[in-house]
């Protein structure tokens, strides 16, 4: 599967979270709260003879700009970090690990960089997720 097909599958899963702006390509100016999906790594031939590949994606959550109170932003980000629930990034993505048929399996491996994130010329409060996809 192409990168754009997998990104679209991830976007479809993330769009199940109400009120979240989902970008499957890097926007010039994201409207928060937002997630931006970017491929970051691709390993070829994990099994022998042109076998299965694996891809990793960075899913960046931006909750607010620098002008917002950080404590409110932290509380909002925390809701997206939960394992379960209506705003859980992990639950939304893993709700259909096949991403509508684009993958054999998908899982959210981790989150990192909780705090101030720079994007373009702006600062946001947010967090980055690492997502692993075994594409078809």
Image: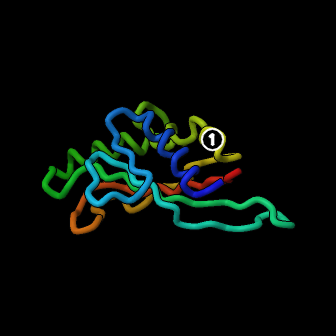
Q: Nearer the viewer, residue 94 or 76?
A: 94
Is 34 rendered above or below residue 44?
Answer: above
Residue at 27% across, 47% down: 32
Q: Which residue is mark 1?
A: 97
Q: Is residue 49 left or right of residue 25?
A: right
Residue at 51% across, 55% down: 110
Is 85 rendered above or below residue 56?
Answer: above
The total of numbered circles placed on residues is 1
Indicate the position of residue 102 as horizontal and vertical percent values.
64, 46
Looking at this view, name the residue that lies furthest to the left: 67
Looking at this view, name the residue that lies furthest to the right: 49
Is 56 rendered above or below residue 6?
Answer: below
Residue 26 falls in image quadrant: bottom left
Q: Nearer the viewer, residue 37 or 3?
A: 3
Callout 1: helix, strand or loop? Answer: loop
Residue at 67% across, 67% down: 43
Q: Is residue 124 left or right of residue 108?
A: left
Indicate the position of residue 36 as horizontal and vertical percent values.
40, 54
Indicate the position of residue 8 as horizontal and vertical percent values.
52, 47
Q: Nearer the viewer, residue 24 or 92?
A: 24
The colour scheme applied to this rendered structure is: rainbow
Residue at 42% across, 45% down: 81
How many residues crowd around disc 1 within 10 Å: few (fewer than 14), some, or many (20 or more)? Answer: many
Indicate the position of residue 69 as horizontal and vertical percent values.
15, 50
């Amino acid at each position: 599967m192409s990168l754009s097909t997998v990104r679209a599958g991830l976007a479809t899963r993330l769009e199940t979270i109400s009120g979240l702006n989902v970008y499957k390509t890097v926007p010039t100016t994201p409207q928060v709260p937002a997630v931006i999906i970017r491929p970051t790594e691709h390993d070829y031939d994990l099994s022998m003879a042109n076998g299965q590949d694996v891809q990793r994606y960075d899913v960046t959550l931006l909750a607010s700009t620098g002008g917002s109170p950080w404590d409110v932003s932290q509380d909002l980000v925390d809701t997206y970090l939960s394992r379960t629930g209506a705003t859980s990034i992990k639950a939304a993505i893993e709700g259909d690990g096949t991403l509508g048929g684009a993958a054999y399996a998908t899982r959210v491996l981790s989150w990192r960089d909780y705090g101030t994130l720079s994007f373009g010329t702006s600062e946001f409060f947010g967090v980055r997720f690492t997502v692993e996809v075994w594409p078809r």
